[in-house]
Image: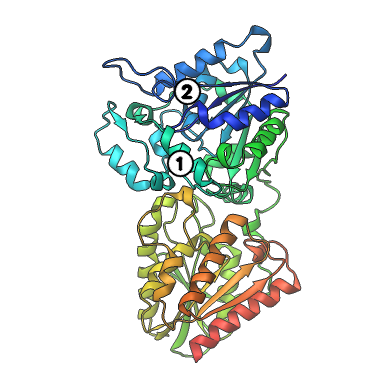
């Protein structure tokens, strides 16, 4: 018999598990829901400081209440903030735990407080600015403010009403006290359940592994499995039956395993470009490379902006990746200057400085006497998509075309980006007559495809001029995932469309 211990997230308590727990029990499992102090458990005593260690002790107490014959069979599930006390308890009782399930939660590390996983960047800054004060409570979200903590996609009006009515204040000490781990928990198998209505799915996590992000390399371990649920951040309320099924499969060791890096084979983003393009000389200045066409000029220019986040230590850097060098050589061979650059989008908090890097590189390109400064196109890829917002919102006269390939065109809910900037879906309303070329991958990740469709709907409403180049069988980053006639044709058509706008 499988024994589940379920730990709820911030502001919530055992009540959120009602339907999922009932389904698990109906399938023959034993289920315990943890009542954390102040969040459905005992109230804090007068003057008692409730912190992460308090909640770890709550989970340990439930683990210790399990009959000896079931020790070693426990599947410990932590949702959202709940993964922090769950991991802390598992580290102290590692021999009792068969598997830990991260339910739409982060990857807590020793010495890091739960505050680091709060999605809303502004809220993190506000709480961190309190000088580390651990007393007091954070009021629960109002009904229309739960999205600051995760996507409410899939929640019925009744479920959102109940979530709001039963929410409790979160003791600040639980978010500010660092998690302390001895390392014993590292031996326990792990499953991640990714809610794609809130953040990245399995394919995007695999991309991060391929890029060499150190923090995610451990996710390719054979003892780590993954599942996806097409819903928002509270699947126990929006998809309780499906969640129960996933937890049952996870307990049995099922799930998708990521592919570890193979030293004998380059990762997908470093495989050859799908077109056979001739080598061309390049000039490197700072973070920018220029590929020059034949003839004296001045020539129009296309500036290629890579996606991300890309780990700061990734080598080669993006401007040397086959996709960018392939496009740059191809464009230069067709009469335009091509520029590639490295920008500092190393984390989701880096969009502002990445935008500064891009703007500086564009001005550097425009200042080159071999470039026609009044005929410039910008071409963005993947996670560079949010950087298009500045240019869409106020396109300069010299910007003759904006292109984007398999872009993310709205921040994912789990990113925590607030404010109007870096939201192309909104910015396109100010694009005016700026020509836009959008390369759409037919086999795109669902969470990214949703942002593309949202952008196109917004563009139709405001009459923006968007030309879509479809690659029906194309995947994210299709240029290096294996050449096909369809993909080659799409690249040629996209380049032709951009160059046509530059020379019009």
From where the camera sits, is residue 76 visible? yes
Q: Quadrant of the N terminus?
A: top right
Relative to the observer, which residue lies in front, 133 or 366? 133
Q: Quadrant of residue 134?
A: top left
Type of colouring: rainbow
**Residue at 68%, 44% in the rendered image:** 259
Relative to the observer, which residue lies in front, 402 or 16? 16
Q: Quick check: 462 above or below 196?
A: below
Q: Name the front one of labels 1 and 2.
A: 1
At mark 2, the secondary structure is loop
Q: Residue furthest top?
A: 68
Could you say where residue 464 lies in the image, as x and y percent from the top left? 48, 79
Q: Which residue is mark 1?
A: 161
Relative to the observer, which residue lies in front, 353 or 270? 353
Could you say where residue 146 lies in the image, as x and y percent from the top left? 42, 44
Could you say where residue 239 lies in the image, as x and y percent from the top left? 61, 41
Q: Quadrant of residue 100?
A: top right
At mark 1, the secondary structure is helix
Give how far apart the Cα atoms at labels 1 and 2 are.
37 Å
Could you say where residue 384 lies in the image, as x and y percent from the top left? 48, 62
Circle 2 Cα neighbour tier, 10 Å, few/some/many (<14 / 14–19 / ≥20): some
Circle 1 Cα neighbour tier, 10 Å, few/some/many (<14 / 14–19 / ≥20): few
**Residue at 62%, 48% in the rendered image:** 230
Relative to the observer, which residue lies in front, 370 or 91? 91
Q: Quick check: 395 above or below 183?
A: below
Q: Which residue is mark 2?
A: 181
């Amino acid at each position: 018999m499988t024994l589940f211990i379920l730990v709820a997230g911030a502001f919530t308590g055992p009540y959120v598990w009602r339907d999922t727990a009932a389904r698990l029990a109906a399938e023959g499992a034993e289920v315990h829901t943890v009542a954390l102090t102040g969040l459905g458990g005992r109230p804090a005593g007068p003057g008692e400081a409730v912190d992460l260690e308090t909640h770890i002790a709550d989970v340990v107490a439930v683990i210790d209440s399990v009959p000896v014959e079931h020790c070693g069979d426990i599947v410990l599930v932590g949702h959202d903030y709940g993964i922090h006390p769950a991991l802390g308890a598992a580290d102290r009782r590692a021999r009792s735990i068969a598997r830990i399930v991260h339910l739409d939660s982060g990857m807590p590390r020793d010495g890091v407080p739960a505050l680091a996983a709060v999605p809303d960047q502004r809220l993190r800054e506000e709480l961190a600015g309190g000088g580390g004060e651990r007393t007091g409570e954070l009021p629960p979200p109002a009904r229309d403010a739960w999205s600051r903590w995760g996507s409410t996609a899939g929640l019925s009006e009744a479920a959102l009403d109940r979530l709001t009515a039963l929410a409790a204040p979160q003791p600040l000490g639980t978010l500010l006290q660092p998690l302390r781990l001895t390392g014993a928990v590292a031996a326990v198998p792990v499953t991640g359940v990714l809610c794609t209505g809130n953040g990245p799915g399995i394919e995007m996590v695999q991309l991060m592994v391929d890029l060499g992000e150190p923090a995610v390399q451990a996710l390719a371990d054979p003892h780590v499995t993954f599942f996806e649920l097409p819903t928002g951040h509270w699947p126990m309320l929006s998809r309780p039956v499906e969640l129960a099924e996933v937890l049952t499969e996870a307990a049995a060791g099922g799930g998708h395993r990521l592919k570890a890096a193979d030293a004998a084979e380059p990762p997908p983003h470093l495989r050859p470009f799908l077109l056979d393009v001739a080598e061309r000389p390049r000039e490197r200045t700072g973070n920018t490379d220029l590929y020059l066409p034949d003839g004296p000029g001045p020539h129009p220019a296309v500036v290629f902006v890579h996606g991300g986040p890309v780990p700061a230590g990734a080598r080669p850097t993006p401007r040397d990746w086959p996709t960018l060098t392939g496009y740059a050589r191809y464009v230069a061979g067709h009469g335009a200057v091509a520029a590639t650059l490295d920008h500092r989008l190393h984390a989701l908090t880096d969009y502002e400085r990445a935008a500064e890097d891009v703007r500086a590189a564009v001005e550097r390109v425009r200042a080159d006497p071999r470039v026609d400064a009044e005929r410039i196109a910008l071409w963005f890829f993947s996670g560079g998509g949010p950087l298009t917002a500045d240019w869409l919102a106020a396109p300069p006269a010299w910007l003759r075309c904006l292109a984007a390939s398999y872009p993310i065109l709205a921040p994912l809910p789990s990113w925590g980006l607030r404010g109007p900037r870096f939201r192309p879906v909104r910015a396109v309303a100010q694009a005016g007559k700026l020509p836009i070329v959008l390369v759409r991958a037919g086999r795109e990740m669902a969470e990214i495809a949703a942002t593309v469709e949202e952008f196109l709907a917004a563009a139709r409403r405001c009459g923006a001029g968007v030309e879509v180049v479809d690659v029906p069988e194309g995947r994210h980053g299709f240029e290096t995932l294996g050449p096909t006639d369809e993909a080659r044709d799409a690249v040629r058509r996209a380049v032709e469309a951009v160059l046509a706008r530059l020379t019009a």
